[in-house]
Image (cartoon, helix red, strand yellow):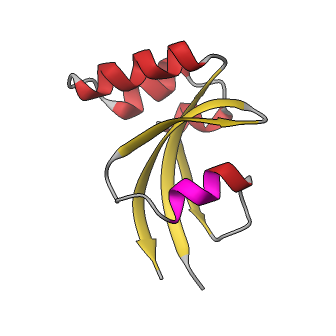
Amino acid sequence: MAKATARHILVDTETQCQSLKDEISGGADFADLARKHSSCPSGQKGGDLGEFGPGMMVREFDEVVFSADIGTVQGPVKTQFGYHLLEVTSRTD
């Protein structure tokens, strides 16, 4: 079964999410921004979500995590929780 590890930053608005993505593109550290801005408890771990399989996260999240290139920041991705920046750190099929 497929497994992935990923990290994310969860914020309330698409504008804030895009702004953080722009900061990362400009060289800011993903984990530092997650600790400062993410409303998810995983933010304290730099956004690290650990390992999970398909169906363990919300659909919108799964669609990105199990298709995106590893190591690239994806988003904003809207879910019922808010707006996410996602980075797949590893994946096995």
Give the residue displayed 27% in from the left and 23% down from the top: 28
Tell me, yes or no, whether the highlighted magenta stretch contains residue 49. no
Give the residue displayed 73% in from the left and 67% down from the top: 55
Query: Where's the N terminus, which quadrant?
Result: bottom right
* Image-quadrant location for residue 30: top left
Image height of 88 relative to 86, above or below: below
**What is the magenta range?**
61-66
Q: In the image, 2: left or right of 87? A: right
Give the residue displayed 63% in from the left and 51% down from the top: 61
Tell me, yes or no, whether the highlighted magenta stretch contains residue 63. yes
Give the residue displayed 43% in from the left and 55% down from the top: 88
Q: How many labels, in total?
A: 0
Please provide percent x and percent y for residue 39.
Answer: 65, 24
* Image-quadrant location for residue 54: bottom right
Please provide percent x and percent y for residue 87.
Answer: 42, 47
User: Among all residues in the image, which is located at the extreme left?
Assistant: 27
